[in-house]
């Protein structure tokens, strides 16, 4: 449907600055909710932790670093509480790692991944009914590295796209300058030629 004046109304989706990130966040939140309902014993603590997790996940769209730190803090809190089952937060951590590395913050992403694995290892060693095993943690660490690698790959791809656009824009500006210079030279020659012809006409007229 067209807006008054004949212009098309932009869809809300076109106003989203980072649609890929928005989709990833929506997917992570959906998986988190599904995992939450799979928790055997839901309490007020698990409800509160899940709400905070969802809020931090949504906040990654606007502020990656503070929300990633908040996610790590939530991992620590939920990891040291005994006999309470929480969401694994895997989806949220994956997303935060990918976004950190995408923004060029690879070292903070690695620190976050290592800290998360250490917390889960503590859970394995200290808690009797741990949801994790050492082999499982090794697998999780590999997936964290994969998430960081994907973020770096996407960032590199975007950088190359920007670089190519800048090169094309520079070439276009150079071509425009060259075309303008040629037009000025041609205009100058036409002016000189016209001036000479007018001078000759005036001389012939005087004679």
Image: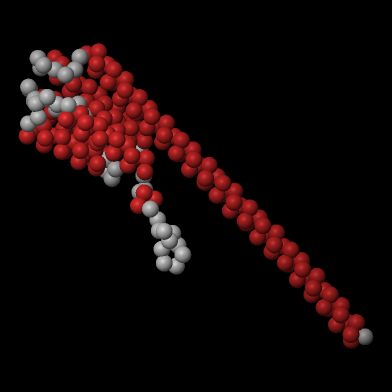
Which quarter of the rendering shows the C terminus?
A: bottom right
Q: Kindly identify the residue that appears in the image at 41 percent across and 36 percent down.
A: 155
* Left or right: where 205 falls relative to 5: right
* Residue 140 horizontal/vertical position (percent): 27, 20
* Residue 122 horizontal/vertical position (percent): 15, 19
Q: Kindly identify the residue that appears in the image at 67 percent across and 59 percent down.
A: 181
* Left or right: where 200 falls relative to 151: right
Q: Nearer the viewer, residue 25 or 41?
A: 41
**Colour option used:** secondary structure
* Residue 62 horizontal/vertical position (percent): 28, 45
* Left or right: where 70 falls relative to 8: left
Residue farthest along the right direction in this orientation? 207
Residue 106 lies in quadrant: top left
Residue farthest along the bottom direction in this orientation? 206
* Residue 168 horizontal/vertical position (percent): 56, 46
Q: Kindly identify the residue that appears in the image at 38 percent across and 29 percent down.
A: 150
Which quarter of the rendering shows the N terminus?
A: bottom left
Q: Is residue 42 visible?
A: yes
Residue farthest along the front direction in this orientation? 1
Is the residue 110 above or below the residue 66 in the image? Answer: above
Residue 190 lies in quadrant: bottom right
Is the residue 165 above or below the residue 50 in the image? Answer: below
Q: How many marks?
A: 0
Q: Is residue 126 visible?
A: no
């Amino acid at each position: 449907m067209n807006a008054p004046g004949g212009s098309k109304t932009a869809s809300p989706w076109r106003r989203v600055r980072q649609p890929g990130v928005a989709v990833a966040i929506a997917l992570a939140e959906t998986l988190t909710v599904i995992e939450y309902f799979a928790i055997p014993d839901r309490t007020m603590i698990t409800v509160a932790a899940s709400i905070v997790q969802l809020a931090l996940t949504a906040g990654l769209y606007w502020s990656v670093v503070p929300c990633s730190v908040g996610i790590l803090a939530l991992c620590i809190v939920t990891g040291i509480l005994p006999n309470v089952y929480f969401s694994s937060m895997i989806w949220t951590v994956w997303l935060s790692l990918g976004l950190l590395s995408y923004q060029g913050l690879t070292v903070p992403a690695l620190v976050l991944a290592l800290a998360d694995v250490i917390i889960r290892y503590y859970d394995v060693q200290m808690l009797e009914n741990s949801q994790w095993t050492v082999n499982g943690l090794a697998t999780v660490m590999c997936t964290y590295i994969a998430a960081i690698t994907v973020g770096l790959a996407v960032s590199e791809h975007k950088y190359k796209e920007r670089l190519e656009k800048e090169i094309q824009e520079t070439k276009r500006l150079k071509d425009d300058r060259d075309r303008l210079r040629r037009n000025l030279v041609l205009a100058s020659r036409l002016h000189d030629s016209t001036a000479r012809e007018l001078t000759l006409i005036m001389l012939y007229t005087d004679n």
